[in-house]
Image (spheres, rainbow, N blue to C red):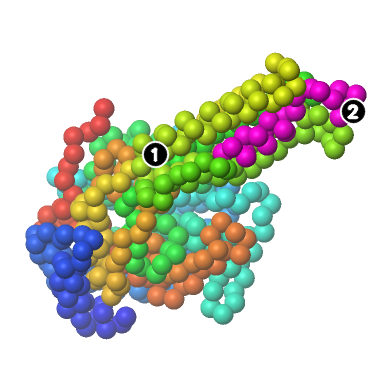
Amino acid sequence: MTTLFKHSFCLVLLSGIQAAAFAQEVNIPPNTEALFSKLAADPSVKQALDFLKKDDANTLAEQKALVMIPSPTFKEQKRAEDFLGRLKKAGLDEVRMDSVSNVCGVLHGTGKGPKLLLSAHLDTVFPEGTDLTIKEKDGKLYAPGIADDARGLAAMLSVVRALKASRIKTVGDVWFCGTVGEEGLGDLKGIKQVFRDHKDIDGYIALESPTVPNEEISYQAAGSNRYRITYKGPGGHSYQAFGLPSAIHALGRAIAGISDLQVPKTPKTTFTVGTISGGTSVNSIAAEATMDLDMRSNDNAELQKLETQALQIAKDAAVAENKRWNSDKLRVEITQVGARPGGSPSPDSTVVHALWLSVKAIGGTPKLAGARSTEANLPISLGIPAAVVGAGGYSQGIHSKEEWFDPANAYLGPSKALLAILGLAGVDGVSAPLLQKRSPRQ
């Protein structure tokens, strides 16, 4: 990859653009190709890319430092404070922590362009007390959260340093945020707050764990609705009170009914009962039992259809359990604990085009990935051009204690992100922004 940046960056970029123009999945406009050609020829852009390669070891060191700071969802404060210091040190302006502990800063443009947001999430799925010791084996780093999303945070910092070192002046403002509440029941708490505070965001990129090295671009959002369903009854002794309805039996009826639901393969629509709990002892009629239900689809109509069916089954299970014992003492409580909006926009958006050409520029083969459930769900649902990309390197075992990260050529992730940023936000005196300013949301 050395010759790519030192000797033939322009050639690779131009050939990549030509190949991308013929790709079935996207239709790259000629003016976009021309804009990236201009960027490729600019000395400051080459300087920034060279910086990213030299900064690779430092970026990996920051990734290791960040993953060692516990950051369970809802308890991200310590990592947020550390990341705030790193953003300030990298040279961003207006670095601050907001009301929910997101940490954001801005690279100001000329004041005449769009507003682009990049984010990576601060939280992990791992609870307090998890051993976060990093182990190295066969060139890979093993640690819970080493890729998801410590890599995204570290890559973002490297991009900021490269932009500052090369003194590139963008046309549009570029915001960088480390966000809370991305995982599980966090329900996108952080990114929802960012978009409440900034109603003038024109485009968005999420830096996520790299499951395919520097290639995949996700532009569709798998929406999800999550419910906690709890059955409550009188409870009692399994022998002496036999004949009373059981919360666990009702839960079982509901799970059996939900498991038999039929959902379409296209658009991909899924469901699972992820957790269950309840009961007091083996010789007790359960007074309470709970399940957490997750439903997903990148088609909002299908998601709503599935939700209606599943929740009706949950209600019917309580009725059936009461009827079985000629009772009215068992009831069901249904509480929504998560709502991630989804969407299936066209791949022909400015953000997808910029990332596509950026992947080609670093020598990769871009491909459109399937729908994902990430922070990009929110801007996609709002009609804002958005996509998700890997932050460099390669990882597997995400959300498990065996999660690992391969740092080989990891600098290509930040390189891709930097090129996309410059294409979308524009470079003063070199290229106009691809991203169009939108009317601020109400």
Residue displayed at 22% across by 33% down: 440
Magenta stretch: residue 110 in it?
Answer: no
User: Could you tell me residue 189's position as x and y percent?
Assistant: 46, 38
Instruction: Report x, y in % for residue 376.
Output: 36, 47
* Residue on which disc 2 sits: 239
Residue at the far top in the pictured view: 328
Q: CA distance from mark 1 to mark 2?
A: 45 Å
Q: Residue at x 19, y 45 (%)?
A: 114
Q: Disc 2 marks which amino acid?
A: Tyr
Residue hosting label 1: 302
Q: Are marks 1 and 2 in contact (CB under 8 Å)?
A: no
Q: Residue furthest right?
A: 240
Which of the two residues, 263 or 40, is positioned nearer the viewer here? 263
For label 1, the crowd category at 10 Å Cα-Cα, with few meaning under 14, some 14 to 19 and many 20 or more, is some
Residue at 13% across, 68% down: 37
Q: Is residue 251 magenta?
A: yes
Label for residue 407? none
Where is residue 200, by image quadrant? top left
Residue 242 image position (x, y, % from top left) = 85, 25
For mark 1, give the secondary structure.
helix
The residue segment tinted magenta is 236-258
Q: How packed is label 2: few (under 14 Cα within 10 Å), some, or many (20 or more)? A: few
In the rendered image, the quadrant that contains the N terminus is: bottom left
The image quarter in which residue 379 lies:
top left
Viewer-nearest residue: 292 or 380: 292
Q: Amino acid at mark 1?
A: Glu
Residue 134 in sight from this viewpoint: yes
Can residue 81 be seen in the rendering of this structure? no
Front-most of 199 and 396?
396
289 over 373 or under it: above or below: above
Residue shown at the point (30%, 46%) measured from the top left: 344
